[in-house]
Amino acid sequence: MKLTLALAQINTCLGKVEENLEKHLALVKEAQSAGAALLVFPELSLTGYVLQDIAATVAHRPSQEDPIFRPLLEASQNIDMVVGFVDEDSRNRFFISAAYLSHGEVLHVHHKVYLPTYGLFDEGRFFAWGDNIQAFDTPFGRAGMLICEDFWHASPPYLLWLDGADIFIFISASPGRGLSANPKLESARWVDHINRAYASLFTSFVLHTNRIGFEDGLNFWGGAAVYDPNGAEVVHGPYHQEALTLAEIDLNQLHRTRARLPLLRDERTGLVLREMNRILSNQNSKDRR
Amino acid sequence: MPDLTINTDVARQILTGFIRSEINRMGFSRAVIGLSGGIDSALSCYLAAEALGPNNVLAVRMPYKTSSNDSLSHAQMVIDATGVQSKTIPITEMADSLIACFPEMDHNRQGNIMARMRMIILYDQSADFHGLVVGTGNKTEILLGYTTLFGDSACAINPIGDLYKTQIRQLSKIMGVPQPIQEKPPTADLWIGQTDEGELGYSYAEVDKLLYLLVDQRYTPAQCVEAGFSETFVRAVVERMRRNQFKRVMPPIAKLSNRTVGYDFLYLRDWGT
């Protein structure tokens, strides 16, 4: 089965959800006319990234009743999409979130579980920590979504893999940093490396999109990419400019790669669990590492 | 020894994008730059001209009576090469009318007055030209505090403040900043014979490497000594950085209420754009 993907690496307007929605709907049309069946937007694509005190004022519930999500859900009748937004739960906690929309339904919402609060990042100050990592079924197979820092940690992709995800959808608002003699920024190099590694280690598809543009002095580097279950790069978008990057993936590649390389078959989850329990039960002992 | 080499294509793309984006988001399309004849303001001017188009950049030369002729002619080279708009507004009269009130004034005070007179002119020109003031301070001088608060450090945006002097030189070369500007010894030109390196007591090439280890690579002072820098030098630079932190932050506001600007009223400049 072939699937045509569209990765939108866009600039956003900080705190102006309606303006960002317009851009989303325009890209939906563009992706649709290019024949894409799944369109992926970056982290916080509906709000902008460094929200700080704006966070609480741009939250939306992913439902038909919501004025922002209604038109997106309508648009999802014709194309599946992943959007980034601020979710406010029934007890008024705010989450950095990703929603998967398909045929007018919200198939899954992921709340970012790792909020970087160090260096230039301050997410933990403004947002609640998500507490679930779950794969979900889509018309194209089982998938999982993670947001930026979530996949800087190795465990969330691993959990998605065990939960049945064959398609990893990663979205970011990654500030560019680490300029050296290398033609790629250190942050771009790092993300490209690990995403290729996840595709290889989990013999799965990895889709990543990242926003572009500036917020005050921060730049966002774009560079959307798709890797196949062999760890081969299927497509790579440009750095630092807006683009809708299209890729056709062959889902049958999962069969071919896993017939050759049965890493999933041989994964010893019972061993992992046993060792995790041992490690965690030793947590109070003096020789803890 | 650390390698401070940067990829100039990436730097150029990010910095021109930054200038364009941040000026447009504030509702402007033009920039004003004080052109001293030195390499930092030359580079800012090249970047702004590339980002906005030369016609949207106003370079202002602001000589004092003791300013060297080279400063003026080197600034002119930048104006000619980039094709930006330009003005020359001498500061002698305005600076001297204040300096004359205090006959005992030393050259540091005089230098600060000159730097602040230039700031006044740039902000006034910015209103007239409908452009934002683009800064010309580099990372080395920001970290060392080798700058006049509310003087040459005043600007709306600063594209080159995360580049060490060594890296400014590398990027300037690629951007085509005229040779004499690249080669002359850096000077604030606030009094005759002044050079940055003479006043600081060390060369930029040397201090940039140390700052890169201390700041970018998070070396402790002791680890810098282990890496080959003299202990006196390391101590002097660390102390100079610490002492000048006040120049790098907004003035602290005494907190009284539940929500105070700077502490818990937090928005980017780009809020709503």
Image (spheres, coloured by chain):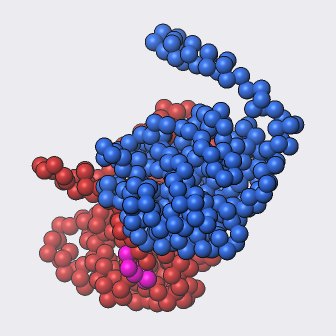
In the image, which lettered chain appears red? Answer: B
Left or right position of A244 against B195: right
Q: Residue at x 66, y 37 (%)?
A: A164
Instruction: Residue A282: give x, y in percent of width and height.
Output: 51, 11
Inspect the magenta stretch and tell me whether residue A181 lies in it.
no
Q: Position of residue B109 (x, y in %)?
A: 25, 65
In the image, A94 versus B16, the foreground residue is A94
Q: Is residue B172 visible?
A: no
In the image, what residue occupies the spot 74% across and 58% down? Answer: A3
Identify which residue is drawn at 14% across, 75% down: B101
Tell me which corner region of the image, top left, top right, bottom left or bottom right, holds residue A278.
top right
Q: Position of residue A72 (x, y in %)?
A: 50, 65
Near-viewer residue (A141 or B67): A141
**Magenta stretch?**
B26-33
Q: Which chain is blue?
A: A
The residue positioned farthest toward the left in the image shown? B256
